[in-house]
Image: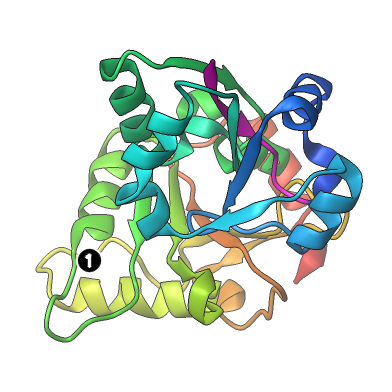
Amino acid sequence: MTLYLIGIGLCDEKDISVKGLEIVKNARAVYVEQYTNVLQVGVDRLETLYGRKVEIAAREDIEKRGGEIIASARDTDVAILIVGDVFSATTHSDLYLRARQAGVAVHVVHNASVMTAIGATGLSLYKFGKTASVPFYSSEHPVDTPYTILSENLLLGMHTLMLLDLDPKTRRFMTISEAIVELRRMEERKENHIIRDNTLVVGCARLGCPDSRIAFGTLSEIEKIDFGKPPSCLIIPGQMHFMEEDVLRTFNREL
């Protein structure tokens, strides 16, 4: 029997691949995780299309009860649906490794993720450096890692994708404006300042969906925009080819 890790894309129930859908229809148990990212539809929409009961798996279910799920895959086919692509989050890499170490067969079905969908901005995927995650602010545990990653990427002329914190369980999602505030706060603790009001940035929301939004402008311009429903991300470009700039300028009208 097999543990199936299935990426289901970025937007709705129809983003699942034909291969993934066939596996889901035949699996004994089907789980969906919604803590690393969120779809634009509820689980009921998944169940209607898939014709199956889909159980929501919280982070603790995957991280703490992962052993139970893996063990059940010894006797029957189990599918875990993952928003975006399977390996966009280290949690799922850990699950994959644990299953392999336990001698359980694992099959992966890939799908689109934010890591590829950002190509819609016109920025070359080859020119992105290390990805940064911007966490919610904590006065007790201030974090500077995103700013450090940005500094390193800019030094190499690379673009920086910043993923924004989210907690679907409490319906809390960081906005692009909040992420910019966090970056400014991080910069206050640094001697060398690398972002300014006129720094060019790209704000994105709901990539992969029909109502996706991309806006290109200065930091102060993007900070004022309400991008609507999550999830969102922020991109700070490095050195750009003229074709990248040409495509990005088409999104100026989004301001």
Specify few, some or many for label 1: CA neighbours under 10 Å numbering under 14, 14-19, or 20 or more. Answer: few
In the image, which residues are magenta? 1-11
Front-most of residues 31 and 12: 31
Q: On the rendered image, what quadrant is the N terminus found in? A: top right
- Which amino acid is tagged 1? His
Instruction: Residue 144: name its quadrant.
Output: bottom left
Q: Is residue 128 left or right of residue 103?
A: right
Secondary structure under the numbered disc 1 in the rendered image: loop
Name the residue at 48% across, 54% down: 36
Name the residue at 26% across, 48% down: 149
Q: How is the image coloured?
A: rainbow
Name the residue at 80% across, 44% down: 52
Rendered view: 21 above or below 132: above
Q: On the rendered image, what quadrant is the C terminus found in? A: bottom right
Q: Is residue 235 left or right of residue 96?
A: right
Magenta stretch holds residue 22: no
- Residue 187 visible? The answer is yes
- Residue 124 visible? The answer is no
Residue 198 spot, x, y in % from top left: 48, 69
Magenta stretch holds residue 10: yes
Residue farthest toward the front in the current orientation of the protein: 75
Name the residue at 11% across, 83% down: 140
Residue 217 spot, x, y in % from top left: 62, 64
Q: Which residue is mark 1?
A: 193
Residue 147 spot, x, y in % from top left: 25, 59
Residue 137 spot, x, y in % from top left: 29, 80
Instruction: Residue 251: name its quadrant.
Output: bottom right
Rendered view: 76 above or below 92: above
Front-most of residues 170 and 104: 104
